[in-house]
Image (tube, rainbow, N blue to C red):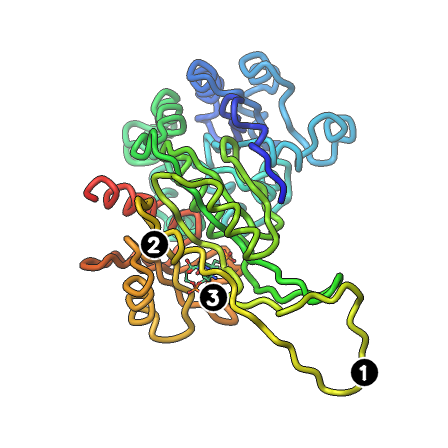
């Protein structure tokens, strides 16, 4: 079992400001200053076209750091390369976001430093569109915005008023102070509450090289942990074997087996709430061979014994935390989820359909949440967006509990 508090815990919020080629780029230095005033550390990446509207030197002066401009600059990559920059950021704020940049982001292109950094980052993505009002109303732009929002991006504005082209309408970039306020606001709905969250699969060893596992990537659980932290909660994330890194301020404990996960969860209690997103193996091999099991040509049988049911055990404690389970179902999703809610005495259960192409190891999901007397259909969206909605339901229900 290994444990670490993310190194970002005590660091200021790290914001990468992306600048694309719009006249509103003249407001971006002001945005950088407003973000720094609110305690953020800011770096800037700009597209080639943006340099026609604002100079890198101005943005360097206000951010205090060299501006990131090109993907193929050997010297710049030797400093903070684009992948490092993508990992560094807690938030990416594209201001102004032109119609062209939105199209490239929606298409998942990585043809310059800014689009590549966005694609390579798990940071929250904020878009402050700025363009002519007719462009903003165009179905292509609307569709690109809808696609990006579906993936979890947050759109700020645009506002309406007189535009640089002399016309009136929606398309003005929001004022820098408004953008900075939105990015740094953060909800305090769960301030002072301590959450334990599990995520990812468990691996149950058969021998030194083989295990029984499942396809959980950990994305849903990490998104829930991050949304809770965003809402002001103190979060301990207990993760099975996954290839993800958690954002700043989340204590993370890595485990491998269901038994290790159970022990790690119990060691973290008491807490105000427990959210069990992990796909915990229900069974493990009765014994683990110390040597690699050799092929014999004969058929073989594996004896499996039940693993602890962590969720049931936590819900059975007295006093107990507020308990939220997940139900991964291939059929009769609502019915089976309600049965689990009742059987395990949970406060809430979030149900998702799982199969070859949904639920596990995907960026998107669909959730319906049940309590004993209510249900909330959160729809289908990115796991990040769903986690935020789930956290709102949890906060509301904890308040009423
Ligand atoms: O990780 P991703 O790729 O993003 O995929 C997300 C997910 C599909 C794994 C996630 O959304 C999800 O559904 N998680 C629950 C998976 C699961 O094990 O479901 P279940 O219906 O078998 O279990 C019901 C509940 O009991 C779950 O909260 C589970 O964490 C818990 N459980 C199960 C078995 C066990 N031995 N101990 C438990 O605590």
Q: Residue lying farthest bottom?
A: 298
| Apparent side of residue 285 relative to residue 210 in the rendered image (left or right) | left
Q: Is residue 361 visible?
A: yes
Q: Earlier in the sequence, mark 3 or mark 1?
A: 1
Image quadrant of ligand 1 equals bottom left
Q: Is mark 3 in CB contact (under 8 Å) with mark 2?
A: no
Say above or below: 290 vs 145. Answer: below
Q: Name the residue: 66% across, 37% down.
A: 83
Look at the image and tell me in which quarter the N terminus lies: top right
Give percent across and percent down for residue 44.
57, 25
Say above or below: 194 vs 343. Answer: above
Cα distance in 3D space between marks 3 and 1: 37 Å
Query: Which labelled disc corresponds to residue 316?
Result: 2
Q: Name the residue: 44% across, 52% down.
A: 383
Give percent across and percent down for residue 204.
62, 62
Residue that label 1 marks: 296
Say above or below: 88 vs 210. Answer: above
Q: In the image, which is nearer the foreground, mark 3 or mark 1?
A: 1
Front-most of residues 218 and 2: 2
């Amino acid at each position: 079992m290994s444990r670490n508090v993310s190194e970002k815990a005590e660091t200021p919020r790290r914001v990468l400001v992306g600048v694309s080629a719009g006249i509103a780029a003249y407001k971006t230095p002001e945005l950088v200053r407003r973000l720094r005033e609110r305690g953020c550390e800011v770096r800037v990446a700009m597209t080639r076209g943006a340099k026609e509207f604002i100079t890198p030197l101005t943005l360097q002066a206000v951010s205090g750091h060299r501006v990131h401009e090109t993907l193929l600059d050997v010297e710049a990559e030797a400093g903070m390369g684009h992948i490092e920059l993508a990992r560094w950021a807690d938030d990416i704020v594209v201001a102004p976001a032109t119609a062209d940049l939105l199209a490239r982001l929606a298409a998942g292109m990585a043809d310059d430093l800014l689009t590549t950094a966005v694609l390579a980052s798990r940071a929250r993505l904020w878009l402050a569109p700025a363009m002519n009002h007719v462009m903003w109303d165009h179905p292509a732009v609307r569709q690109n915005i809808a696609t990006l929002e579906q993936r979890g991006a947050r759109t700020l504005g645009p506002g309406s008023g007189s535009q640089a082209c002399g016309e009136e309408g929606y398309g003005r970039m929001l004022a820098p102070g408004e953008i900075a306020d939105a990015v740094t606001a953060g909800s305090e709905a769960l301030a002072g509450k301590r959450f334990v969250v599990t995520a990812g699969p468990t691996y149950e060893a058969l021998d030194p090289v083989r295990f029984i596992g499942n396809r959980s990537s950990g994305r849903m659980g990490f998104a829930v942990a991050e949304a809770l932290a965003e809402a002001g909660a103190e979060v301990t994330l207990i993760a099975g074997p996954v290839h993800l890194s958690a954002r700043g301020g989340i204590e993370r404990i890595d485990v491998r087996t269901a038994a290790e996960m159970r022990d790690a969860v119990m060691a973290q209690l008491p807490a105000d709430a427990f959210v069990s997103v992990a796909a915990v193996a229900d069974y493990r091999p009765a014994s683990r061979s110390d040597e690699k099991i050799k092929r014999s040509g004969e058929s073989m049988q594996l004896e499996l014994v039940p693993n602890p049911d962590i969720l049931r055990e936590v819900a059975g404690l007295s006093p107990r935390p507020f308990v939220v389970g997940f139900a991964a179902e291939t059929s009769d999703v609502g019915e089976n989820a309600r049965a689990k809610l009742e059987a395990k005495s949970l406060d809430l259960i979030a149900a998702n359909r799982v199969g070859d192409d949904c639920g596990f190891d995907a960026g998107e999901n669909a959730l319906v949440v049940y309590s004993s007397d209510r249900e909330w259909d959160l729809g289908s969206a990115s796991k990040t967006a769903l986690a935020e909605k789930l956290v709102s339901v949890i906060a509301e229900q904890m308040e009423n509990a």
